[in-house]
Image: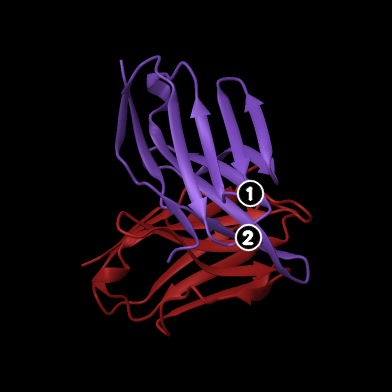
């Protein structure tokens, strides 16, 4: 079983729709949760960062973490064609000597149709 | 800030040849990561350095792969001999001290024919 599971999609929605992207994980040691966005032929870039459980909002984006269920979500409101990209969840845990290991989900390919 | 710099951006090589990918992390960052991305397997961590020391190389597929970080501003990932199944995008990433987020380079697109 993978440490982090993410539906690879593809997911296609009309412009203006609310998008929900999700990941589940098995390692209860994960404490830091991130969402990265990756445009075609580019490197991933950090979109949202959350520590432990709770919600975080940044403009049209909301990240949720439920540690009890080992489940994280990213919501995109009023989706735009420019949001079309692959979204990767990522999680990290301390592995010793202050070092941290970051594990990524497989990524969900999202297309917003005008 | 110049960001993480990787070279070459694109490489096409024949099976059996040696491939060397290079990375310059963001200045001041003390952690460096090498990832491989494919459609089938997604983004996989190959090896992780902290203060130039390899911390976790459990993701290195086999002995054909090796990575070095001789100093804080340079790292290499070498594949020798290369095989067609090594074709992928290889990303280097770095992270600052005490930080939890990592910053990626633009990737090295490797094709082994």
Q: Is residue B14 above or below residue A41?
A: below
Q: Estimate the x, y position of residue A91 in percent, counting from the top left.
A: 59, 53
Q: Earlier in the sequence, mark 1 or mark 2?
A: 2
Among the 4 quarters of the image, the one containing residue A111:
top left
Say whether residue B40 is left or right of residue A31: left
Q: Estimate the x, y position of residue A99 in percent, counting from the top left.
A: 72, 66
Q: Which chain is purple?
A: A
Which structural element holds mark 1? loop
Gap between marks 1 and 2 measured at Cα: 8 Å
Asked whether the residues under the numbered discs 1 and 2 touch, taking CB atoms below 8 Å apart as contact, a structural biologist would say yes
Q: Is residue B97 above or below residue A13?
A: below
- Dot label at residue A28: 2
Q: Residues within 10 Å of mark 2 (few under 14, many from 20)?
A: few
Q: Is residue B57 above or below residue A53?
A: below
- Dot label at residue B44: none
Q: Estimate the x, y position of residue A82 in percent, counting from the top left.
A: 41, 23
Say whether residue B56 is left or right of residue B27: left
Which structural element holds mark 2? loop
Q: Nearer the viewer, residue A67 or B96?
A: A67
- Dot label at residue A67: 1
Q: State the residue lying farthest toward the left.
A: B113
Q: Chain of mark 1?
A: A
Q: At 49% across and 20% down in the image, what residue appears?
A: A77
Q: At 63% across and 60% down in the image, what residue appears?
A: A28
Q: State the residue lying farthest toward the front.
A: A68
Say whether residue A101 is left or right of residue B16: right
Q: Nearer the viewer, residue B40 or A93?
A: A93
Q: Estimate the x, y position of residue A47 in percent, counting from the top left.
A: 57, 35
Q: At 78% across and 71% down in the image, what residue appears?
A: A97
Q: Is residue A99 above or below residue A113?
A: below
Q: State the residue lying farthest toward the bottom.
A: B63
């Amino acid at each position: 079983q993978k440490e982090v599971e993410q539906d690879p999609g593809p997911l296609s929605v009309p412009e203006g729709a609310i998008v929900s992207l999700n990941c589940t994980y098995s390692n209860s040691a994960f404490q830091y949760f991130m969402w990265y966005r990756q445009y075609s032929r580019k490197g991933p870039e950090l979109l949202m960062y959350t520590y432990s459980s709770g919600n975080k909002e940044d403009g049209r984006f909301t990240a949720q973490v439920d540690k009890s269920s080992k489940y994280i979500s990213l919501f995109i409101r009023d989706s735009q064609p420019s949001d079309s990209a692959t979204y990767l969840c990522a999680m990290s845990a301390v592995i010793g000597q202050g070092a941290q290991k970051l594990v990524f989900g497989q990524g969900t390919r999202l297309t917003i149709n005008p | 800030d110049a960001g993480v710099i990787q070279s070459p951006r694109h490489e096409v090589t024949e099976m059996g040849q040696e491939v060397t990918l290079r990375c310059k992390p963001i200045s001041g960052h003390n952690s460096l990561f090498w990832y491989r991305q494919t459609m089938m397997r997604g983004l996989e961590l190959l090896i992780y350095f902290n203060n130039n020391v390899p911390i976790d190389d459990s993701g290195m597929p086999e002995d054909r792969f090796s990575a070095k970080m001789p100093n804080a501003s340079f790292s290499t990932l070498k594949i020798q001999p290369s095989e067609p199944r090594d074709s992928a995008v290889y990303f280097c990433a770095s992270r600052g001290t005490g930080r939890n987020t990592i910053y990626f380079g633009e990737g090295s697109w490797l094709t082994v024919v």
